[in-house]
Amino acid sequence: MKKLLYIVASSKPESLSSCQRGARIFLNCFLEQHPEYVIEEINVFHDAIPQPNDHHFLSRATLVNGDRFRQLSEQDQNIVNRMQQLCDQFKSADRYVIAAPMWTLSFPYKLKQYLDCLILNDQTISISPKGVKGLLHTKKRKAIYIQSSADIYPFKSMSIPFVGTRVNHGITYLYDVFRFLGIECIEPLLIQGTEIDDSGIELALAKASGEVAHRCEAFK
């Protein structure tokens, strides 16, 4: 079977999380259309996501091994092993669904911490004297980023001198990172205006849900 990795970057329970509710609608539709997929789920707030530091690497993005690994404390060995588990899980997936709220013009910090555990030399990227290249182009992978936000972009309820994706750095960052890894297809599904008077959570979800059927078909 093919695998879809569902990455949740929200600390809320699903019933109180707009991005997770939207993602669940998408996942249910996708599985109905494509029952050959199995879903694995990880929540970067509730599951163990290490904080990598220099003790865990031999050189640029290369995890320690051999004697260097055995010299680490038990805690640091567990961190290295967990990073490897997360990287292996990510590499094994065919499709990725990421659900996150907008935080400070981007996404929650835990998602960045998770990504830092995945970008490893000779595993998801290759570092050589010729440069750095992604290694995840070996099969057709796709990702969708489902983001909820209190406002609508370009701004509808505030007047500030920014518009559109210029204040939506979560989308542009994930686009750059996934393409860096070799995953060319990543698209956003936005749940916008959850906290403005003429929209609200239910209307924002309804608008996003209207896109789900054809987005699922394109995601196959």
Image: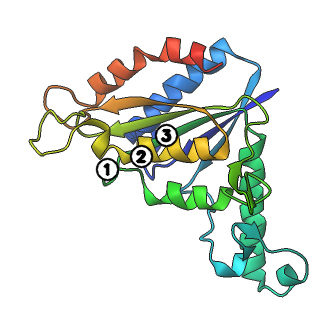
- Label 2 sits on a secondary structure element that is helix
State left or right for residue 42 relative to residue 165: right
Mark 3–mark 1 distance (CA, rounded to whole Å): 15 Å
Residue 20 picture location, percent across and down:
46, 37
- Label 3 sits on a secondary structure element that is strand
Give whichever of discs 3 and 1 has the lower sequence position: 3
Foreground mark, 3 or 1, reads: 1
- Residue position for label 1: 105
The kind of residue tagged 3 is Ala
Q: Residue at x 37, y 47 (%)?
A: 169
- Residue position for label 2: 170
Q: Residue furthest left?
A: 159
Residue 113 picture location, percent across and down:
55, 62
Within 10 Å of the Cα at label 3, are there few (<14), some (14-19), or many (20+) other Cα atoms?
Answer: many
Give whichever of discs 1 and 2 has the lower sequence position: 1
Mark 1–mark 2 distance (CA, rounded to whole Å): 7 Å
The residue lying toward the viewer, choosing from 36 and 121, is 121
Q: Residue at x 23, y 30 (%)?
A: 200
Residue 119 lies in quadrant: bottom right
The kind of residue tagged 2 is Gly
- Residue position for label 3: 99
Model colouring: rainbow
State left or right for residue 163 relative to residue 116: left
Residue 155 picture location, percent across and down:
18, 36
Residue 160 picture location, percent across and down:
12, 45
Picture quarter with the N terminus: top right
